[in-house]
Image (cartoon, coloured by chain):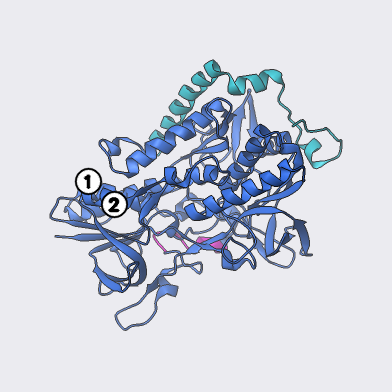
Amino acid sequence: MKVKYTPYTQLAEAWMQPGPFAKFTRTCVLWQIVKFAAYNLKIIKVVAKGH
Amino acid sequence: MAKVVVLGSGFAGQTAALNLRKSLGKDHEVVVVTPNKKFGYVPSWVWVGVGRMDVSETQFELAPVYKRMGIGYVNGLARAVHPDDNYVMVDLLEGGEEKVEYDYLINATGPKLNYAATEGLGPDHGHTVSICTPNHAAEAGEEYLKMVERMERGEEVKMLIGTGHGMATCQGAAFEYIHNIAFDLEERGLLDRAKITWLSNEQALGDFGVGGMVIGKGGYTVSGKIFAEASFMEKGFGWITGAHVTKVEEGKAHYITIDSAEDQVEEFDFAMLIPAFAGVPIKYINKDGNDITGELCAPNGMLKVDADYTSAAKGFDNWKKEDWPETYQNQTYGNIYAAGISFAPPHPISKPAAAPDGTPIVASPPRTGMAAGIIGHVVALSVADIINGKADKPVHTASMANFGAACVASMGKSMTKGSAAVIAMFPVVPDYERFEYGRDMDATFGDQGLAGHWLKALLHHLFIYKMKGKFGWWLIPD
């Protein structure tokens, strides 16, 4: 669904529409494998700091 | 020989019971008292609520696990604790009652879902659905699919998602639900037939009851509010924040806000609003037969522990990390502990606000599965050390102001097109004396994408495996 930009509305004030490349990276398997590894490392860091 | 009784079989209770069994010799007894026959993996109920997962995939039978692990199991509802005489009266599900004696008691009952605090709220006696129990989530899924049928017939449907009380918590679950609905409708080509509105007690989107968060992104340091709003903008959701729902009628939610005490109405065809939480109504009776629940528990019924409960009155600007409990030991009865949602927080994490008529509106502190597991774990270690003669007081600590939390918020269930927001923060309670933005920016982040969904799916299987106490379960972090 494409959201229409209408100035001076709640949606317009929060406008940060991802472009085609940003949308592509969200589901690009190769890039997401890298992200998956990064998330795990970052979460391990969070867990480790609390122990 | 010592006997430890754990009330509850959620993340905190199950983690405590498994760790106690691991740390104590066979001459000591571990008993779980729970009204449930099955463990429920709460984080996946959001998928049940949109009909994308069968509720049975989120559950497993407790009895075989306890039998294999050598953990006692009393299937009933704890009615009264007699702390001077060290026993709990339990109403058994099969009928009758049982007196369960203990040397150490861990209250890990989780919350009472306080639908009654908002007239007309909830699936049993109200007009809204819920994803807070497995049955409710399954019912929510059925109701949601009825809305899908209406949209397929060409109707437009109004959906209202969020919190149903000014003091509610668990905004994260509602955030997941609203995004999963949008994802599912988008896949069905129906999103433009739904008017979806968020209604919440958060002062701003992205607060989540933890005072919001700041994350590093693209070389900038950015408020999480911006990303939360952008995610709503992208799907065309409207949002109302700082709201206390006063009453729900058929198709209408009445609310007031921080800005206005005038009755406002949001109409809906389908509403999922998270209720306020309260403590499970267990009575504490002293040796004279007097009810001392009011002394041991906060007004909402949650058990007081080693927090500084005088700090609430000092005001948001004077709150410190030392206000938060570390050992979760009750300060009147040293052999009683609370773990997970059952402990009474000293005060909110988010800044309190109120409607012009004085009605308090503040997102209550969340205690996610990770926090509940960590607390259940340290309580179990402390109790085991005392029983094993290694300590004479609880020595294992886990303050929410000293440990972090990771939250994977689903935004759509699909292994190829799904998405989730991966959010981590350290610590949970911001510490502005230690960190410029309240949290360690090296261990606080947020991101969104397909990998987040993979992580959420992995955690589903990993934690169900762990909670079953299968081989190597203790290697999986809380």
Q: In the rendered image, which residue does mark 2 sit on? A: B17
Where residue A37 appears, x then y in whole percent?
46, 22
The answer to whether residue B215 is visible is: yes
B424 relative position to A4: left or right: left
| Place of residue B309 in the rendered image (x, y in percent of width and height, measured from the top left) | 47, 63
* Residue indicated by mark 1: B22
User: Which hue belongs to chain A?
Assistant: cyan
Q: Using the image, determine if residue B350 lies above or below residue B439.
A: below
- Residue under the point 69% across and 36% down: B226
Magenta segment includes B34? no
For the point 32% across and 52% down, which residue is it?
Answer: B62
Q: Give above or below for B341 relative to B217.
A: below
Q: Which one is nearer the viewer's eye here, B73 or B422?
A: B73
Name the spot of residue B16 as percent of width and height, x first. Answer: 31, 51
Q: How many marks?
A: 2
Residue ranking furthest to the right = A7
- Is the Cβ of the residue at disc 2 closer than 8 Å to that at disc 1? no
Mark 1 Cα shell of 10 Å, populated few (<14), some (14-19), many (≥20): some
Going 48% across and 24% down the picture, which residue do you hit?
A36
Q: Residue at x 38, y 36 (%)?
A: B462
Indicate the colour of chain B.
blue
- Residue toward you, B250 or B233: B250
Left or right position of B417 against B371: right
Q: Please provide the residue range marked out in magenta.
A: B304-313
Amino acid type, callout 1: Lys
Q: Amino acid at mark 2?
A: Ala
Q: Earlier in the sequence, mark 2 or mark 1?
A: 2
Q: Is residue B209 visible?
A: no
* Magenta stretch, overall SS: loop
Instruction: Give the image location of residue B63, x and y in percent.
Output: 28, 53
Mark 1 belongs to chain: B
Q: Residues within 10 Å of mark 2 (few under 14, many from 20)?
A: many
